[in-house]
Amino acid sequence: MANLETTYLGLRLKNPLVAASSGLTSSAERIRKLEEAGIGAVVLKSVFEEQINNEITSLLLYESHHSGYPEAEDYIRHYIRDNTVSKQIKLIETLKKEVDIPVIASVNCVSANEWTSFAKDFQEAGADALELNIFYVPVDRKEDPGIIDRLYAEVLQKVKEQVSIPVSVKIGLYHSNIIGMVDRLKANGARGVVMFNRFYEPDIDLDRLELTSSEIFSSPVEIRHTLRWVGLVSSQVPEIDIAASTGIHSGEAVVKQVLAGARVAQLCSALYTQGDAAIPSMKAEIIEFMKKWNFNRLEEFRGRLSYQQIPDPMVYERSQFMKYFSNRGK
Ligand SMILES: Cc1cc2nc3c(=O)[nH]c(=O)nc-3n(C[C@H](O)[C@H](O)[C@H](O)COP(=O)(O)O)c2cc1C
């Protein structure tokens, strides 16, 4: 009998399907439905520093027109911060009473200062773990190219000084050495890494000559970005738990990520486009694969096709275009 249980960040999960941080994980009602559909864990919608700052700015603008009291500024800053954070705290507290699955809080910030106080609040509210979503776009040519890696390590260190719950870091694809970066995160106390975030990407509208945003949902072909790095990182930094993320739209895609070495698969676009029905259908596909290959537990095939386990690890290191073109030429 196929058993889908797994652990992630030291937490026990009934299966490896985790709802990724998004609007789908921003309310207790929605999360209860995900649990009913069989999700293994949830990562809450991130609290964004940007969002807090924007709220502050618009309220300050409003106030400057209406009050003329300079002390209002301090009040508003505190009110907004407390209000945004307290909503999250309330959500975590409610979920801890009402659902039976691990609840991972998520914070998004580029400044090490704000992170730390958020982190502590979430831990006190009962979050089982914390996911740090750090996104920094260097736009200054004079900035040292190593700044992003250092920023991640610095933020993580500061958070780890504040909390004892497990911390994972959600990273992007744009690091000069992803394996070295994950190794450094591990050394700074990360229990897990989420590979990868999929950022809001720009596009250009040629009819309006305006910048717009490109497709916000991933497509199934995007798992290839994740597969290579999950396969490499799981071999090179085996002490860290990997949550595969981006482009996972089927049970087969989950199986592939586990074969490459992931502990869990985070789902976002699949839940938006297929609805909660994606969860039982993915579980059924994983079970079907396990029956076909006579596997009883995920551990029996986790990492079986990771970088160090396959006879030709070059497949992970280089794309096979030479072979492809030479075959086509025949
Ligand atoms: C509408 C939407 C909202 C999202 N909000 C967040 C967020 O608050 N925090 C975060 O870390 N990632 C957020 N993400 C990114 C997802 O968690 C996920 O990493 C990304 O969509 C790639 O996974 P997918 O291919 O399954 O969609 C969001 C994605 C979407 C589409």
Image: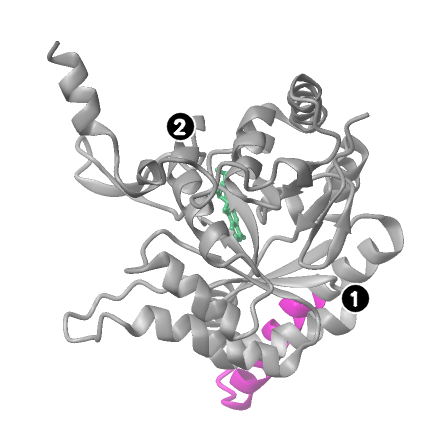
Residue 264 percent location from the top left of the image = 62, 44
Residue 31 percent location from the top left of the image = 74, 43
Mark-to-mark CA distance, 2 and 1: 37 Å
Which residue is more in the foreground, 31 or 229? 229
Q: Quadrant of the N terminus?
A: top right
Residue 40 percent location from the top left of the image = 73, 42
**Type of amino acid under label 2:** Val
Residue 61 seen in the current view? no
- Which of the colour schemes (rainbow, by chain, secondary structure, one colour) is used? one colour
Which residue is more in the foreground, 262 or 266? 262
At x 79% / y 41%, what residue is drawn?
32
Q: Is residue 198 above or below residue 163?
A: above
Q: Nearer the viewer, mark 2 or mark 1?
A: 2
Question: Is residue 86 found inside the magenta-colored segment of the image?
Answer: yes
The residue under label 2 is 221
Magenta-colored span: 67-87
Which residue is more in the foreground, 253 or 275? 253
Residues packed near mark 2 inside 10 Å, few (<14), some (14 to 19) or many (20 plus): few
SS of the residue at dot 2?
helix
At x 68% / y 24%, what residue is drawn?
290
Sequence order check, earlier mark of 2 and 1 = 1
The furthest residue to the top: 330
Question: Is residue 207 found inside the magenta-colored segment of the image?
Answer: no
SS of the residue at dot 1?
loop
Which label was assigned to residue 126?
A: 1
Which residue is more in the foreground, 40 or 80? 40
**Type of amino acid under label 1:** Gly
At x 18% / y 30%, what residue is drawn?
207
Residues packed near mark 1 inside 10 Å, few (<14), some (14 to 19) or many (20 plus): some
